[in-house]
Image (cartoon, grey):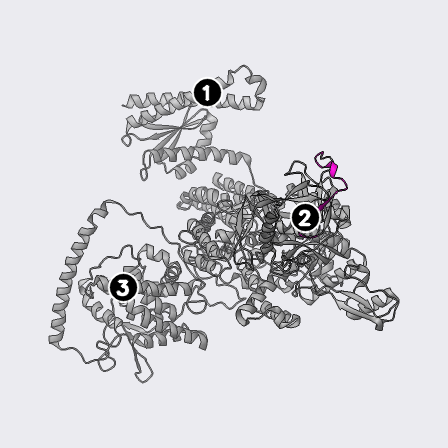
Amino acid sequence: MDTLYISSHPDDFRSLLPLIAAGFCPSPPRILHQDPPAELARSRPALVLAGAGGTVLSGTSAVSWYLAATGKRAGSDKKQESQVWQWLSFAENELTPVACAVAFPLLGIMGVDKKLQQSSRAELLRVLKALDGTLALRTFLVGESVTLADAAVAMAALLPFKYALEPADRKSLVNVTRWFNTCVNQPQFLKVLGKISLCEKMVPVTPKPNTASNVTVTAAAAAKPDSGPANGPPKTEAQLKKEAKKREKMEKFQQKKDMEEKKKMQPQTEKKAKPEKKELGVITYNVSTPPGEKKDVLSPLPDSYSPQYVEAAWYSWWEKQGFFKPEYGRKKLSEPNPRGVFMMCIPPPNVTGSLHLGHALTNAIQDCLTRWHRMRGETTLWNPGCDHAGIATQVVVEKKLMRERKMTRHDLGRENFIKEVWKWKNEKGDRIYHQLKKLGSSLDWDRACFTMDDKLSFAVQEAFIRMHEEGVIYRSKRLVNWSCTLNSAISDIEVDKKELTGRTLLPVPGYKDKVVFGVLVSFSYKIEGSDEEVIVATTRIETMLGDTAVAVHPEDSRYKHLKGKMVIHPFCDRKMPVVFDDFVDMNFGTGAVKITPAHDHNDYEVGERHKLPFINILDENGLLINVPPPFLGMKRFEARTAVLQALKDRGQFKEVKDNPMVVPVCSRSKDIVEPLLKPQWYVDCREMGKQAADVVRNGELKIIPDHHLKTWFNWMDNIRDWCISRQLWWGHRIPAYFVTVNDPAVKPGEDVDGHYWVSGRSEQEAREKAAKRFNVTADKISLRQDEDVLDTWFSSGIFPFSIFGWPNESEDLRVFYPGTLLETGHDILFFWVARMVMMGLKLTGKLPFKEVYLHAVVRDAHGRKMSKSLGNVIDPLDVITGISLEGLYAQLADSNLDPLEIEKAKQGQKSDYPTGIPECGTDALRFALCAYTSQGRDINLDVNRILGYRHFCNKLWNAVKFAMRTLGEGFVPCEKAQLCGSESVSDRWILSRLSAAVALCDGGFKAYDFPTITTAIYNFWLYELCDVYLECVKPVFSRTDSKGQKQADVCRQTLYTCLEVGLRLLSPIMPFVSEELFQRLPRRRPRDSPPSISVTPYPDTAEFCWHSEDVDRQMEFVMSVVRTIRSLRADYNLTKTRADCFLQCIDSETAALVQKYSLQIQTLSYSQAVHSVVGDAAIPQGCAVAIASDKCTVNLMLKGLIDLGKEVTKLTAKKGELEKQMEKMKEKMTKNDYKEKVPVKVQEADAEKLRQSEAELQKVKEAIENFSKMM
């Protein structure tokens, strides 16, 4: 056996490290707390290897490395080994010296130099800050489990954590503190270190006399590795005496300093410091489990719940076992399943995206529903996918190109740029899938789809061609939302509506100075041939260069005389008619409106109606065209200033005033969106919109909650045609070709003429179509494919059937289309849901799903919309794993916000998360999101409430641990959950509550009422099973007689049923903790039990049908008595003393009920004994009195334990309160119109309240009289 020589001092971290490393060895060495023989080595630690010719290793690094390598904790490969070496070097050369410089003066090893100590402390914090940043995204320093790197750095940080890092320091080092706590709570660390007490205040520590010399030598040696006995001759006796005297002087000096320090601190001792909040424990799962293998469930459960432990290893096992696949447990997919089919596709997240809490809500709800349907035995598929996100992805890759290579996409060319995007997608694009797995989403990953995959791209092409051939897709020149920065049309959902209350300066890309918005400029147009003028107003003065008319209302008497008149444009010779149109509001402004048909949506329609010229004054880059000098070529917002000045110079400017307005801002580029005339492809939505409205009206498609129906019908009944062209390179290129016929007999076509456009699956097919249309040979046809790509929502619109290979037939398409449910946020009801319905009906003749469930929008705790500039956009993974405030700040620094917005966001984060976000875990986050999801309401998400559900997990954990100890190792559950007839009243009650919870969950899932589900589960576990039943049955398990043993066996069966069914109820919402605990329970039928809770049947009301309203009512009465007794005990501070309790019952029936539940009342109220007293029977003197109900009064024997005067005062106050209530009630009931106006039910309730108050008042009077006699 190897022998390890080490120091015995608890703070000698140089010896502690080898000890911890030894703990990982399969065959640990023999430990000797002494110096090694001089002939072997000169210093500790030293390791003498057995059977290796007496080889000796000395020095902390060498010994620790050998032991860690033996225990496979020095890295799993060459890369990891080198990383471990780097961390060893960091511990020894960077952290240890500053740690010693700070800690040694506190331990009395070195003299106290305040300046040196302060500078050392600052340096220590700097080093630890750097370490904190490294640990922000890691659990351990190297790999996914504890290595020598963690042990070495943790031991170097040991002295600071014990003696120097105060709570405030630890709060600023939240990642280091989390990691340190994780390390020192590992079994190997605990065995060596015991429980570590962290520093509360940095003060000198008096060393123990018997170890002072030891620490002086060993610790000083640690600080200076090159000095000491390891590298020099042994010290002489004279030297040792001299050192001993020096130490004695130092100790006296230190004691004097301690006394001075105590005097300084004396006044502060009067004020009690608030105890620091107990830090949440971090326990990790360290059993080596290859991905896909089942987690170890044989080792004991940790003492407390820790998300890191619970959530480890399960997901890869679920996935490998195929639990998430619809084929699981079925011979053939197409074989009919009597329980039905459930199919839902994920709203495909953007490939560029990263999860935010909105995604987390969507996935929490969808996964709960999927897991519930799967546990019900249905053939279940939740299909994953990702959207190519045309604009978003192109912007990301363009920025990357510019940042890394100083190139634009045009420098690369279309083909090479597309290759760059695919390269980026393949490197970064599956990040969101990893995040979804972290959330526990039970998606069938083998069916994952990307909207640019060949299968889906073929479906997109086919959909366009079919709709184009049918005339549903057509070419037209219309106004679109144009982003000058992106050089592309954008969809309405990509336009943010920025509300302004008045004059506001906004930043615009490409402009050095901010631009004024939120003002209304008035100016005049001169009437041709007269001195008269018409005053008009606009918020976009530069657009007057494109005006072609002035409009007034036909009924406006002020302007009737202008019929047939013209106005003169001040900057060109354009004459513009005065037109009469109903759209003009006579009461707004002057009642006259300028018309710019090519740059305003309302004006466009006026222009169409009155056949006005459409003059486009902006090019794609936002520069002015078709305007006179000096405005020609100006940037649009520079022209705004120039036009205003020119109007002033001509005397036609009238005024500028503040004007509340909405400015359209591109969400991608932050540019101001311009309405621009462009030839584009459009989808004719009239007939499809009518169909989509009709299927909802006739009940074929159900939208939940139904208050969204109004929005649906409003959109569908007033739908406009859909622009599907996007001027991008990344996306599905439109399979349409412009035709040029090389034949003089055929006149050339124009871009907007649909006759000259053909679509085809290939250029050859398009050529043949064109030749046939123009009746020429194919060789006379020249084709130019449209450069544009399709709107991303087009491919998303066919997602429910393109993922199954449409238009080709497949088994998946037959089994899973149409789907069952579409679950998403109500904000994309039109952009996605409506288009899926329209395109599904158009292309397949079927609805894509039967129901649509729309969840609410997630807001912050203050009800504000999530916004990066407010600092309230939270990554759910930060809630799951926890993050420091500094970590949140770092994320802001990496964002695209400008410095002012970053500062504003920091303030918001500091206000909401002053100490960062604590680790809550996936289960707690999912539970909180479902608990918040009340239909029809936005969700104000408070992170503290999520943390509350983490505490619920801990309660659950402790309850199951206690229950399993109670069941015992040999416990065998009955093969079926059923009543045996010998259940106690407690058993019958908890089984009644369990059945009620099953019914509530069943109804809740069917109605998408998630708060009902979470409330039922939470109440059952916390308030019914833990707070009542487990307490009630403790006396039963303590009995040793045969009858008691039989009753205990019945209790165990009941307890097992509650645990097993309770975990199954919880499983869809909290998959990780329910699986972890379920795997520890014995099975009813071990041979044919499902391997995972995720494929175990969900509890059904037909099986759990033991709900009894009578039993519930009786127990509610019992609990009211218990609460009353507890309240009395609290009032009189009876924390430990058990008192006799006399329950005065109004009749024999109530007394019988009290007698029946006497054991429960005694146990739950901590009473010595419970006595039922009927009617006016005498109650012993010396009792405190409280009213439990109108049928029962609690008398708690307090003779000799209470202040009688205080009791009388309290009851007198109660008497006055009751008399006031009764007086108010009588006054209300004696009003003249009370009987006529107040409903009968309310009158009956009032009469009952009055009767109860009268009865209570009588009892209070009796109690006062009783105490007065005692006095």
Q: Of the residues under marks 2 and 1, which one precedes in the sequence?
A: 2
The Cα–Cα distance between marks 2 and 1, rounded to whole angstroms, is 52 Å
| Disc ID at residue 1224 | 1
Mark 3 secondary-structure assignment: helix
Residue in the foreground of this view, choosing between 108 and 890:
890
Residue 1127: percent from left, percent from top: 38, 34
Amino acid type assigned to the residue bearing label 2 in the image: Glu
Of all residues, the one furthest to the top in this rendering is: 1232
Amino acid type assigned to the residue bearing label 1 in the image: Lys
Amino acid type assigned to the residue bearing label 3 in the image: Ser
Q: Quadrant of residue 9?
A: bottom left
| Disc ID at residue 269 | none
Q: Is residue 49 left or right of residue 695?
A: left
The Cα–Cα distance between marks 3 and 2, rounded to whole angstroms, is 66 Å
| Disc ID at residue 119 | 3
Camera-side mark, 3 or 2: 3
Residue 779: percent from left, percent from top: 84, 73
The Cα–Cα distance between marks 1 and 3, rounded to whole angstroms, is 71 Å
Q: Main secondary structure of the magenta part?
A: loop
* Residue that numbered label 2 is attached to: 851
Question: Is residue 25 among what the camera can see?
Answer: no
- The boundaries of the magenta stretch are 557-572
Q: Is residue 696 magenta?
A: no
Q: Residues within 10 Å of mark 2 (few under 14, many from 20)?
A: some
Question: Is residue 302 among what the camera can see?
Answer: yes
Query: Cβ–Cβ below 8 Å for labels 1 and 3?
Result: no
Q: Of the residues under marks 1 and 3, which one precedes in the sequence?
A: 3
Residue at 72 percent of width and 44 percent of height: 528
Camera-side mark, 1 or 3: 3
Residue at 35 percent of width and 71 percent of height: 90
